[in-house]
Image (tube, rainbow, N blue to C red):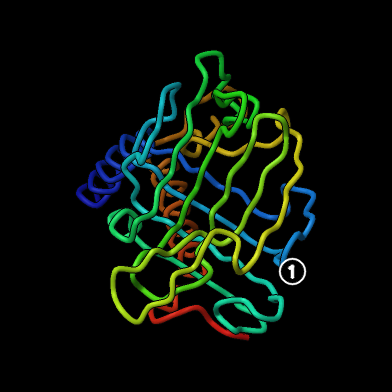
Amino acid sequence: MLRSTLMIITCLSVYTQAGAQTMTFSTSSDDYQLTTVFSDVGFFTISVEIDAALAAGVYVDPPISNVMYQVTGSLANGTPSGFPAFDLQRNITGAEFYAQGSSLSFEIAPFAVLDDGVQAAELVGNGVVLTFNAREVDNGRFHPALLKLNANGTGRIQNSDNIPSLSPLLEVDFGAEYITDLVYDPGNTTLIVGPIPDAPKKRGGGASSPVDIAILTLLGLGCRALRRRMMPVANESDDIAV
C-alpha cells in the first residue's frame, strides 16, 4: 500500500512539473461574430498544446505536443474540390503539424496578466497578432485552415494554400474554398491558458493529504484522457465530403 502511494505521489510530482511547462492555444467559432464571405463555414474549433511555460515572449513555431482542430461547412459551386460540403478533422502531433508545412506564431506582451490566461489584447502587434496556418503541402487536401486574428478585434478563417510539387495534385490558393470574417472583443477573448491550477485546500485551512492529492490527480488525468478520446480523430486520407 505504501509503495503504491509513493508511486502515485511520484507520478503526481512528474505530472505537476510537466504541466507547469505547457500552455494551450484554443479557440472556436463560439468566440466570434461570423460573416461568411465565400461559401458557408460557420463552425470551427482549434486546440494546440504547446510545450512551453506560459510566459511573455515571442513564439514562432514553438514546440507542440498535439494539434486538434475541426472545420465544417458547405461550399459554393465551382470550388477546386468540387465538394458540396466538408468536415475536416485533424488530431496530430506537433512533429506532423510542422512536417506538413503548418505554422503557429504570436507574441505575449510583457504586461500580460497570466493568472487568467492570455487575452487577445495581451498579444503584441498593431496588425495581425496571431496566425495559425494548418497548411498541408503535397497531400491533396483542399480545406486546411488559416486563422488570422488582428489587434483591432477583426480576423478571418479561410482555407490555406497548397502549392504542390507532386503531380497531378491541384494547386489551391488562399480562400479558394471558403472565407469567413470574424469580429471579437480583444479584451474579453481568452486565447491561451496555462496548466490547470493546483487543487484547493480543504475547508478549515488544513492542507490536503497526499492521498487526496493523488486521487484528484488521477481524476484529472482520467478526465484529460477521456477528453482526448472524445475529440474528433483525423481522417488521414482526405477531407470528409458530406
Q: Is residue 155 left or right of residue 26?
A: right
Q: Is residue 231 left or right of residue 137?
A: right
In this orientation, which residue lies closer to the viewer: 23 or 215?
A: 23
Residue sitting at x 43%, y 61%: 225
Crowd around label 1: few <14 · some 14–19 · many ≥20 (10 Å): some
Q: Position of residue 44 (x, y in %)?
A: 63, 61
* Residue 163 sits above or below residue 117 on the image: below
Q: Position of residue 55 (x, y in %)?
A: 43, 24
In this orientation, which residue lies closer to the viewer: 44 or 13?
A: 44
Q: Position of residue 167 (x, y in %)?
A: 31, 79
Q: Position of residue 110 (x, y in %)?
A: 50, 14
Q: Is residue 160 left or right of residue 34?
A: left
In this orientation, which residue lies closer to the viewer: 114 or 216?
A: 114
* Residue 6 sits above or below residue 230 on the image: above
Residue type marked 1:
Asp
- Residue located beneath label 1 in the image: 40
Residue sitting at x 39%, y 45%: 214
* Residue 136 sits above or below residue 213 on the image: below
Quarter of the image where the C terminus is located:
bottom right
